[in-house]
Image: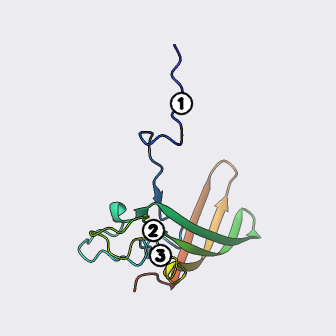
Amino acid sequence: MAIPPPSPLRRNSSPEVRTASGPGLTRDLGPGSYADTTSSDYFDYPNKNGDIKIEANVEYRFKVFWKMEGAIFLDAGNIWALKEEESRPGAEFKWNRFYREIAVGTGLGVRFDFSFFCCESIWRETARSCIA
């Protein structure tokens, strides 16, 4: 007897967790305008997930010499919860403010591409924080 795969519409299937990602977004992302002031953990995973995710990335890569490549990038985005949460004020998605809560990060990178593995180092800076 075969067991059918879980339907994406069923509530009891494994949830898809939307998290902050990308070299320019991880540090300053909400969700929304929420800022956890009680945690000392740099990467506080439970407070960096949500139901809605908007993310954009523009990257320009160029050959420097031999196996070395350079990159310039710009990341933008945030995550939000669908419903208001008492434990995370400002985390819910609101049409009248979501565009003000989009974080922007930019940076430079250098990469050594040896075709069977890559070694990369990036420098990133927050251009616009979504945390008020």
Q: The residue tagged with tag 1: helix, strand or loop? A: loop
Q: Distance between the residues labelled 2 and 3?
A: 9 Å
* Residue in the picture at 46% in, 71% down: 93
Q: How far apart are marks 1 and 3 (CA)?
A: 34 Å
Q: Which residue is identified by label 1?
A: 5
Q: Quadrant of residue 86?
A: bottom left
Q: Which residue is identified by label 3?
A: 94
Q: Which residue is identified by label 2?
A: 80
Sequence-earlier tag: 1 or 2: 1
Q: Distance between the residues labelled 1 and 2?
A: 29 Å
The type of residue carrying mark 3 is Lys
* Residue in the picture at 27% in, 68% down: 87
The answer to whether mark 1 and mark 2 are in CB contact below 8 A is no
Observer-side mark, 1 or 3, equals: 3
Q: Residues within 10 Å of mark 3 (few under 14, many from 20)?
A: some
x, y (%) of residue 100? 51, 84
Q: The residue tagged with tag 2: helix, strand or loop? A: strand
Sequence-earlier tag: 1 or 3: 1
